[in-house]
Amino acid sequence: MNCFSFESSLRLRFSALSLFIGMFLVAGESTASAQFDDLLRRIPSDATAIIVMDVKGIHQSPIAVRRHWGQKHEQAYMQSPLILPPEADRIVLAADVDASNGFETEWEMAVMSLTEPIQMRSVARAESGYLDKLNGLEVAWTPSNAYFVGFEEKTLGAMFPAERKDVSRWIGFAQRNRDVLISDYLVSAAKKVNQKTQIVLAIDLKDVIDPHELSEKLSTSTVLKGNTRKAEQLFPIILGIQGATLSVNLGVTAEGTLRVDFASDAAPFANFARPMLFHALNNVGANIGELEKWTTKIDGNSITATGRMSDTQLRRVFSLLEIPSTKFSSLKDEDVESPGSADQVAKKSKTYYSAVNTLIEDLRKTLEDTRDNHAVWMERYARKVDRLPLLHVDKDLLDWGANVGETFRVMALSTRSSGIKTGVRKSSVYGRYQLNYHDTGGVAYRGRYGAGYASSGYTTARKTSSVKAQIRTEERAKAKAVRYESWKSMEDATAAIRRRMTERYQVEF
């Protein structure tokens, strides 16, 4: 929908597979803190997912200090899996997420507490946007399809997409509201940020599952393998899911704790929880890898999994919700109106090339893994490319980057189209059997124990499950062919632009 509703209730409808994606998106351990309430009160009540970050704590963590995540220089900006404004000390990201549709969002927003003011004029200039005024506040429109809002001297907001009327309504809401209106589950998750847990991601999943869809998914689950009794045990537990949390502890390494919360005892999940989660994520293209190495256990009404997170894993997770742009702050002191010197263009172009290539390499790591069809990550990484800083970057390089982003989208679309086509073809296959015949002169029949074809010709019958499996295999093969062809074209273009830039600027790209 185009209209942004602040007070509307949650209306997300998740399939069972989408449920398990949602399980991955959130975080938490139990501590008490209201340090983010001043930011959370600016978040509308229909937010269904949040990310809460103690940026100061992130930058002071051993891993961030060792790898210079908090520094402004270009290489540090590139190497950090978390791209955050250096001036921010606390950030809340929120969205209305539709996990049943590839994590599509109706809207996304960020509210940041700053250690020093950032003028809207600086944002507009650095991002090649323009100044505007909404509800009495100065705002900056940016080509990343977002508005930045200067709520107060040291409080900055951002909203995506840049729907002017929606941003205006959000400003009015944020100015008059004094209470935290998001769901209790999200509030509880936000309070889990502490000195050891610098980042929490959360999604509220209460009452979002359709019982008939859940029943169908459990009956066809390859993990349960037709175990009807186990499916019957798990059905009410999954239906009563409350939400899920993913806590990130940045110490010497990045450690994650995934917690999925239910309304009742999760004990029946024993021996099934982890494989079902992996299977669901793989099927919807949201495999982040490495979860197989995590330790999983049942804890009362919850399932928890803990393990180490790599840069690639962090980058993928945080691509689900992110600030539309963050580079404006480190560009604010530059002469953004000049064409840029040759050395400056060479430096900015190399940084841009490295950024795009990092995203390509992230996705390449699991390209050969047929379990990961990349749909979600391809779409999110295309958006990451769109949001990279463009100032003083070589035009030919920008054209290449735009093509890379478009290629990511094409590959994601081929996967999603594969799923749609599979569904359409499967819809013509009904019951337990499909008739297969070449004689058109007889009468088809369906009985209690199967189906047949009464005619002078011959008849064969196949189980519907077999036919559906074949359909799924055929459509996935087509999508895979598109992916490999697109990837090869992208690699060829990348090699060509690298040679061209190296020759043009006499700098190794």
Image: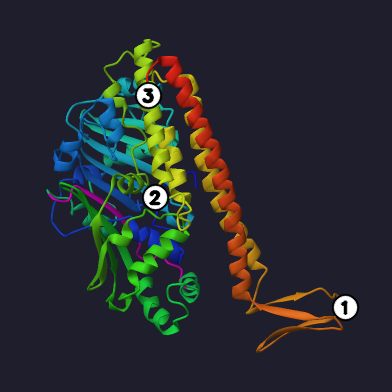
Check the image and report above or below for 75 versus 11.
above
Q: Which residue is mark 2?
A: 96
Mark 2 against mark 3, which lies toward the viewer? Answer: 3
* Disc 1 residue crowd, few under 14, some 14–19, many 20+, Cα 10 Å: few
| Point 20% across, 43% down: residue | 38
| Point 59% across, 74% down: residue | 465
Instruction: Judge from the rendering whether residue 184 lies leftward or rightward of residue 506; answer left or right.
Output: left
Distance CA(mark 2)–CA(mark 1) = 55 Å
- The spot of residue 211 in percent (x, y) is 45, 72
Q: Which residue is mark 1?
A: 441
Residue segment shown in magenta: 196-211
Q: Is residue 4 visible?
A: no
Q: Secondary structure at mark 1?
A: loop
Q: Amino acid at mark 3?
A: Lys
Q: Amino acid at mark 2?
A: Asp
- The mark found on residue 5 in the picture is none
Q: Which residue is mark 3?
A: 350
